[in-house]
């Protein structure tokens, strides 16, 4: 049998946490507004349950929040780095807050669809382990 994809790579490519083969989302392109969050109800490859319970993906909002904070920090670090390298004129956060705001908002809007999918992928990876099969992993154990 072929070795499974490493966990981190699997999270990033939005594949099923249980078999690491089936896709989480119905449409590959995250930039189609109507299908950003369109997920399969169950894994097309192993039938692992992706809907687990009503409102399961509300929790992904916490992950999304953390990713968004990380994105803003990354934008600030990038601005300071590019400023230090002389590629842009950025003298500091308190001197030019508008540069930081505009850069952050543009980056966030551009990356919002993949970030939204990534947060759902991280969220379901927290509840399904490699090797779990069909239905929720907790049902049989209680
Ligand atoms: Zn699967």
Image (spheres, helix red, strand yellow):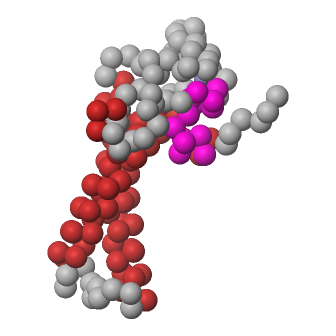
Residue that sits furthest to the right in the current view = 1
Seen at 60% across and 45% down, the residue is: 9
Pick the front one: 98 or 123: 98
Would residue 121 be seen by someone viewing this image from the given angle? yes
- Please state the extent of the stretch shown in magenta in the rendering: 9-22
Q: Is residue 18 magenta?
A: yes
Would residue 129 be seen by someone viewing this image from the given angle? no
- Residue 131 lies, in percent from the top left, at 67, 23
Q: In the rendered view, would you say 132 is above or below 125? A: above
Seen at 38% across and 58% down, the residue is: 70
- Residue 68 lies, in percent from the top left, at 33, 53
- For residue 56, which quarter of the picture? top left
Q: Quadrant of ligand 1?
A: top right
Pick the front one: 18 or 108: 108
Q: In the rendered view, would you say 99 is above or below 23? A: below
- For residue 55, which quarter of the picture? top left
- Residue 90 lies, in percent from the top left, at 29, 85
The majority secondary structure of the magenta stretch comes to loop
Seen at 39% across and 91% down, the residue is: 86
Pick the front one: 30 or 41: 30
């Amino acid at each position: 049998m072929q070795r499974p994809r490493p966990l981190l790579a699997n999270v990033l490519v939005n594949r099923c946490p249980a078999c690491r083969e089936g896709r989480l989302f119905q449409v590959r392109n995250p930039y189609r507004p109507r299908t950003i969050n369109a997920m399969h109800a169950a894994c097309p490859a192993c039938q692992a349950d992706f809907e687990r319970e009503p409102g399961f993906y509300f929790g992904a909002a916490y992950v999304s929040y953390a990713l968004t904070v990380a994105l803003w920090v990354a934008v600030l670090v990038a601005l300071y780095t590019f400023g230090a390298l002389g590629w842009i004129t950025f003298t500091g956060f308190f001197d030019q807050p508008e540069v930081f705001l505009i850069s952050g908002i543009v980056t966030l809007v551009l990356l919002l669809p993949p970030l939204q999918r990534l947060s759902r992928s991280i969220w379901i990876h927290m509840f399904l382990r490699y090797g779990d099969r069909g239905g929720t992993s907790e049902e049989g154990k209680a």
